[in-house]
Amino acid sequence: MVALCYTLYHFQPWNESTLSRGPQQLWDNHTFVPSSEIRSTGLTDEVQWDGYSLFIRGERVVLWSGEIHPWRAPNPQLHLDLLQRIKALGFNSISIYTFWGLNNPSQGVLDFEGWKGFEPLLMMAREVGLWVVARPGPYINAEVTGGGIPAWVASLPDVKLRTNDTVYTEAYLDYWLALGKIFAKHQVTNNGSIIEYVLDDEGTLDLAHIGHLEKTMRDVGIVVPLTFNDVAPKKRLFEGPSAVDIYGLDSYPAVRECSKIGQWNPVRQYREYMESTSGKVGTPYYIPEMQAGWIPLINTKGYQQCLTSYDSDFERVFYLNNLANGIKLHNVYMVYGGVNYGHSAFPVGITSYDYWAPISEDRSLKDKYYELKSISHFVRSSRDLPKTYPVSTLEYRTLHVDQLVNPDTQGTFYVARHIDSTSREKSRHSLIVQDEVGKVDLPVYLNGRDSRILSSNYCWGNTCILHTSASIFTSTTIGNTDILVLYAPQDEEHRLAFPPHQRLSIATDTICNVKEETDEERKVLNFQVGQGVRDLVSIVGGRRKVEVILLDSKEVSWAWEAVVEPEHEEPYGAFYRFGRSENVLVLGPYFLRSAKSLSNTSLSLHGDLNATTLVNITCDPKYKTISWNNQTLNSEQHQLTNIREGRWSAVLPGPDTKLLFQQTEQRIHEWKYKDGLPEVEASFNDSTWKSADKKVTKNPFQPYDKQAGYEGEYVLYGTEYRYGVGSLMLRGEFRGVDEMMNQLDPKERKDLALKVSLISGPGGVGTFWLNGVYLGSGIADIGIEEQEVNLTLRIPHDVIRQGSENVLTIVMDPAPLEEAGAYTGTAESISAPRGIRGYSLLGGNTSAIEWKIQGNMGGWEQYPDKVRGVFNVGGLYGERKGWNLPGYNDEGWENQHLDEENQVTADLGEVRDSGAGLGWWRGRIEVDYPEGLDLHYSFIFPRILSPVRGQLFVNGWQLGRFYGDLGPQYRFPIPPGILAQGNNTIAISLFGYDKSADPKKFIEELVIEVDEVVTTTSLKLREMKLESPSWEEVFHLGHKESK
């Protein structure tokens, strides 16, 4: 009966925190007790619930989930990788939106093909071992254009969006039923992964509309619980008409700008509100959206330093506070944000949707990923946690503690933080806790913005501890050993106590800083954790062999517990605590991807390393051989050592530095250039453009009339002519110019002007030319409530051509469609058009202007590129011609070369004479992904303040919209498979909307870099290639190029 302690490796110690004490500790007891009545939908018992938690297939669980949007990871070949990263966090679920506008781009067209589908993701989730919360909308918000509602729906006459209105219902029904049928197939009742179904999203509610959504889903076979996410504590749909099965409240408690580093808001208390809603009707407490970061916006203040506001400290304080308030269904929004491809973002969104999430846009793992992993492993492994509830609260000097108790087992958790959760104070307290034996003082350390969980009467496997002051990473059983992994910052003094019936004897001559103490009827380990130490205390003599692993709070970042998937597929064999639930514990790697039993004696591990690493593996002793990324480990190559039964160590090589040096900064030195605005010339042939001749619209945003000071009679909204994506072009031909000019006194011709109101959305731009001469431009303010910009442009008399055509050309780079609530406070804001809301020709005859309009080729009905989808391109000439596509014949373009100083040496033609204009550059880059490495390229544009709007296309995919005038994004990560092995076509459009623009600088200083994190991996990046149709493939079906 002896405890053995040995150190695997060791670094220097850390400074101790200071101690403070206070008066008697008085707890404030709560009276509410959750309902124990088990409920279900009445259609299945596979998912049930009571007032404490969910039951899935009879197992009580804390649903610990993360949001990921399939379309924001546009290469599906990377979806498995992302799901593995989420599972490795310790999550047991994902939550996914579907995007109506992407899958139903025009009336009667449903498109779930290729990357736009999500069924493969649902099957992968089951394969990996993740439940799925489906969020089909139909309105989703999600910072996408129109909040997910397609432009064709937003422009329907008399439509009342997000209501039970017949027009709206008929518009969404085909899509809604198709989704329901797909999701029904993948419910847990059909051996699938879906366990919840969220209806609509936040905002204002029409109960009849919600009722119709519910009924139609039940009719197509959705039997799992229906839920709802309330945007604020409004108590909607938890009871009464159209009430859902499980109510949820979204929570975004942190600051929403980053201009002040470290600025925080206090934590929010949910307990009393949840008691009055979910608790009242006997359902568990649910946060469907818990803030992970914030939306990257064009107008984000302090964009480059935002991560400091949503870092590891934020997770520790705010997420543990959620547990303290009894939250048992918890979805982190976002766990992976990804990218807004093309024109899919909402008006003030940028291309990146990184969200400062734990998993970065380039799939690397932020530091906060590892903190969240520690929390998640604790939540997942603590079997008493799901049936706990808040029983009391203590406020003691600067210390706040919430006590959670499991009424069946008396398992107890004390969640500690500072009363002022924004405090940076470093403090130590003595907290009196209750365990099976009685009361005991435990140390509580709070290092500034910090939170800790202390545990008592904690059981796992066949073992129980009386208490511990250290943080629990995981508790698991491997082989015949119960393993407890504890962690703490270096050199803090902590306690771990076992009950006396385990008859433990702790050796006093161990080399670790672990000491035995007998405290009444407890067997106590007092210990300190040194920096970088992996300490193992092996305890024998109890009911079962027990091992305690002690890690410092940095070393725990590299600790991973994974489910060992069975050799032969079993239902839910990859799910934690489902199936046979065999686990493995691995210490050291950057990322543990998966574990699988190849036979009764062979264990396969897959993972990533960012450096040569000492790895410790604890597995079932039956395994005699272990492989890493399909390579069998051995003593010669990997220093494989069988330390003891079921415990191995090995040294695994990191990335080859020679290969890394080959992936250095790159530039494209050979460009081809072509002017992209032939439309500004009066002689341009616009005969195939649509005539903008409507005089009446039912859009709720009516054009301005004479009462508003505008004479124009035509409706010049893009959506009136079935254009709802990207750039919009308008050409107005002046009729009767000679007569008009003859009527003017030559001295008065200087007063001829165009008065115009652009409805371009926040930050939207409109630029004006007459007969090829630049007149000026207007840009709307970037505030969400700003939609319009009004301007008056003087028309010089010498620009007017008597006796020939006179054509006004307007190039608009508008914002995408609004979400519900923006601008108007109602869903009507989604219908806010893009185009011209009012116009007058001052000093001339306004009615003499005849208009043509052009948007993306084919509009939302006949766009030719069905693979990349409707949001990929707008209405620029080059986009309509397919200049963004690989295989386009650019032989007639002007060659552009970068000299040794990266200066463009060739003449830039018209762009040389004026910065106002639009040019296209095409080039190529050769990519060679080294075998066995995971790396990621980014295109980095210079931080130049210039009135330039740009688009980056990689193999035809628009994955970069940058704003030289607004920022803040200049770095654009491109997913492997889109930037593929071999030759890649790069196309860039640069729109200078003012004479001061210098677009070529953005080409001269463009750099292509490998992102910071490079790892060894089992991924096959060289084999990844997303379908990227060539020019010939896009246009070969008989579509003619638009003029």
Image (cartoon, grey):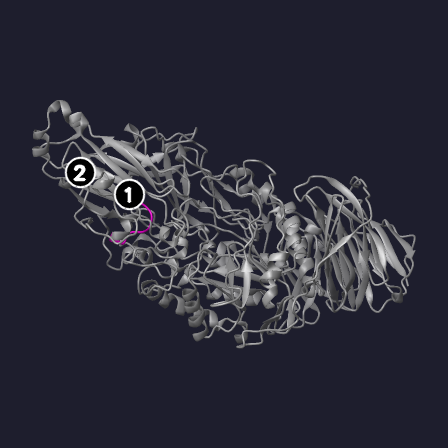
- Left or right of residue 34, residue 693 in this image: left
- Where does residue 946 sit, x and y in percent of width and height? 39, 31
Q: Amino acid at mark 1?
A: Glu
Label 2 sits on what residue type?
Val
Q: Measured from the top left, where is residue 709 in percent x and y? A: 23, 38
| For residue 775, side relative to residue 983 (left or right) | left
Mark 2–mark 1 CB contact (< 8 Å): no
Identify the secondary structure beneath mark 1.
loop
The N terminus - image quarter? bottom right
Judged by depth in the image, the label closer to the viewer, 2 or 1, is 2
Q: Depth check: 704 or 788 in front?
A: 704
Residue 431: mark: none
Residue behind mark 2: 807
Give the percent coordinates (x, y) of residue 80: 53, 60
- Find out whether residue 1020 is within the magenta segment: no
Q: Is residue 919 visible?
A: no
Residue 891: mark? 1
Q: Is residue 938 left or right of residue 423?
A: left
Magenta part of the chain: 721-728
Q: Earlier in the sequence, mark 2 or mark 1?
A: 2
Quadrant in the picture for residue 179: bottom left
Main secondary structure along the magenta-highlighted residues? loop
What residue appears at the point 79 percent right and 39 percent down from the top-left corner? 15
Classify mark 2: helix, strand or loop: strand
**Residue 773 percent across, percent down from the top left:** 22, 31
Q: Whole-Å distance between the Cαs marked 2 and 1?
A: 31 Å
